[in-house]
Amino acid sequence: LNVYFGTELLCGNEPSGKNDLSQERGVKRNPYRFSFDSVTEEEIIAGAVQSGVAVFLHGKSGDGKSARIRQLDPDCEILYLRNASPELLNGKSVYNSNSGEMLDIPPTWYKKVCEKCKREPDKIHILFFDELSNAYPSIQGMAFNIILDREVNGIWRLPDNCRIVAAGNEMKESL
């Protein structure tokens, strides 16, 4: 399992050798020289979630990425992206014939996250984007907008006590 903060690999299996794309692209692996010998992956993930930085878990199918997130927040809101539609992520617009205006309706998951965060303002709630690497490219783009901007469809902001975690499988499993 690899754990990323933004674009930096925090812990996991570091590729080595001539085929290491990170070396070709000039990406530093663990640039702060963190030592993870005395902490577990779960503790690293929990620390990342607590810090408010979006986290990406990358690994083989069945590595327990989803289970690790459910340990942190058993009531996390999970978005399965493999077969997701644009409406699932961004909500939809409908025409109001009475007013002649278009109304933007937020997605159901957003309403649930907002309710949880408002009901328990002192607790961190996780929004989990599962199977990001298996989603259609257009869905991935929408998901990344939410993940990086903490905003849905350019309209609705995520609550401050909402944290984002995404997970994806290795490329050979994502075809």
Image: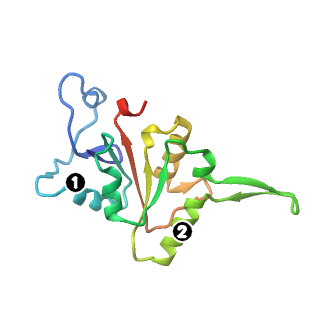
- Say which element carries label 2: helix
Amino acid of disc 2: Cys
Q: Extreme front residue here?
A: 62
Q: Quadrant of the N terminus?
A: top left
Q: Which residue is mark 1?
A: 41
Mark 2 crowdedness (10 Å alpha carbons): few <14, some 14-19, many ≥20: some
C-alpha gap between disc 2 and disc 1: 28 Å
Q: Extreme left residue here?
A: 37
The image quadrant that residue 83 belongs to is top right
The answer to the question of whether label 2 and label 1 lie on touching residues, with beta carbons closer than 8 A, is: no
Visual colour scheme: rainbow
Q: Which residue is mark 2?
A: 114
State the residue in front, 83 or 34: 83
Rendered residue at 41%/34% (across/down): 174
On the rendered structure, is 30 left or right of 5? left
Rendered residue at 22%/60% (across/down): 43
Q: Tell me, yes or no, if residue 51 can be seen here.
A: no
- Is residue 22 placed above or below 91 in the rendered structure? above
Q: Tell me, yes or no, if residue 156 can be seen here.
A: yes
